[in-house]
Image (cartoon, grey):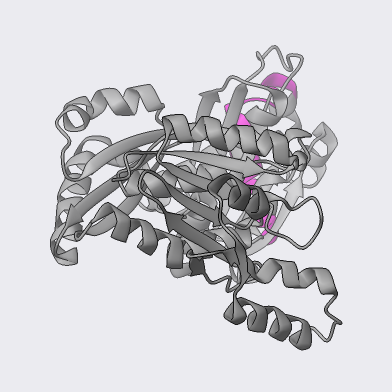
Amino acid sequence: MIRNAEIIAVGSELLLGQICNSNAQFLSKQLAELGVNVYYHTVVGDNSTRLRDAINTAKQRSNLLIFTGGLGPTKDDITKETIAEVLGKRLVMDEEAMSNIKAYFEKSQRKMSENNKKQALVLEGSSVLTNDYGMAPGMALSDETHTYMLLPGPPKELQPMFRHYGREFLLEKLGVKEQIVSKVLRFFGIGESQLETDIEDLIDNQTNPTIAPLAGDNEVTLRLTAKHHSIEEANRLIQQSETEILERVGEFFFGYDEDTIYSVVFNKIQQSSFTLSSAESLTGGLFSERMTSFTGASEVIEGAIVSYTYDVKEKVLGVQKQTLEQDGAVSAKSAEEMAQGVKKLLKTDIGISFTGVAGPGTMDNQPVGTVYIGIALPDGNTVVHKLQLAGTREGIKHRSAKYGCHLLLKELFK
């Protein structure tokens, strides 16, 4: 019976810091949904002796070992060879994998070298996990005490392989008959500790669904996971928990699963047939760069003005000279006139402005982290919000751009 897992990433490039171990993060999330505890992440270089030591150590503390990387055609791809040696297993040719590799080269009109055949070798007696997006197949097998799963290193290959094949293998081993449904709720403008405080009793009393908070990138997420024989009932359980949560912290909620605050704002504005323009001082074009990354951006975004100097604010956006002299560029009045100015200049339904102090020094006698965001609304009114943010220069700029999205949602789609 699988009780706990260890993820062993193989690759010297991970130890050298050349790439990030995003596979471990992905797999930990997936295993958590299956109710499998991950107690250790191990990273080992392309060295069979050290990998052998890592395997033997992992076997003493975990009964599910998942390996990522080292399944390629080169000499430093040593994962399955080392595992075969530790387990006393032979490597055998998988004909289906070999056919897929040959087809890959034929399709790309490239000549297959002899060492590519190595990728079709699998552990004797293992279940082969098809690679739909690459060449090296994965594999999984169990003995009396342990389960082993080998997955390729590239995330674009590993993630669909695990979702489509690896997950099913583990569900069978776990004897799970229930449907497992998961949903992520995304929040902005509230800290992780405050959100947990507001729903503390729901977290403390969780059984099914489970509620797992996670903070990151100035956002907070809650992962709801339910198990039931009926997928409809699992979804109903999740919906019930979601309703209870949003009754308390719904003002900070912006989306689900893979949504970003930018994508949600963009889609809502597009669906409302509004057009948007931005005047950016503090953010230096960051907001408009993110908002123009979506398909159909030309239907929503008319343009942006990066107004970093007083001259551009006055001569391009029409901010009054008196405002700049008396209130300063970092002020509610400047933010208001910047938003109105860009809306008028680019003839859009909405204008949004960002002005503030990202640091490291003060400006207009305002401390670092002072931010004003102005929004000129379709009805002719303009609102300005003042924020006091902490962090690095880059962090303040990114948080300001996200707060702009948060405030657009709040003002336009209450």
Q: In this view, does 295 lie above or below 349?
A: below
Whether residue 154 is visible to the viewer of this picture, yes or no, is yes
Quadrant housing the N terminus: top left
Asked whether 337 falls inside the magenta stretch, the response is yes
In front of the other: 121 or 100: 121
Residue at the location (72% across, 41% down)? 48
Q: Which of 212 and 196 is in front in this view?
A: 212
User: Where 371 falls versus 408 (above or below)?
Assistant: above
Residue 23 at x, y percent in the picture: 57, 47
Identify which residue, 378 or 361, lies in the foreground: 361
The magenta stretch spans residue 180: no
Q: In which quarter of the image is residue 14?
A: top right
Q: What stretch is highlighted in magenta?
A: 325-348
**Vertically, is 93 above or below 167?**
below
Q: Is residue 74 left or right of residue 299?
A: right
Residue drawn at (20%, 61%) of the image: 177
Location of residue 75 (image quadrant): bottom right
In this picture, residue 76 sits left or right of residue 287: right
Q: How many marks?
A: 0
Q: Mainly helix, strand or loop, the magenta region?
A: helix
What x and y, as percent, mark residue 126? 48, 63
Q: Is residue 343 shown left or right of residue 188?
A: right
Mark yes or no: residue 347 visible: no
- The residue located at (43%, 30%) in the rendering is 61
Question: Could you tell whether 334 is left or right of 359 in the image?
Answer: left
Residue 6 location, x and y as percent? Answer: 48, 38
Q: Residue at x 43, y 45 (%)?
A: 29
Percent x, y for residue 74? 81, 58
The image quarter in which residue 295 lies? bottom right
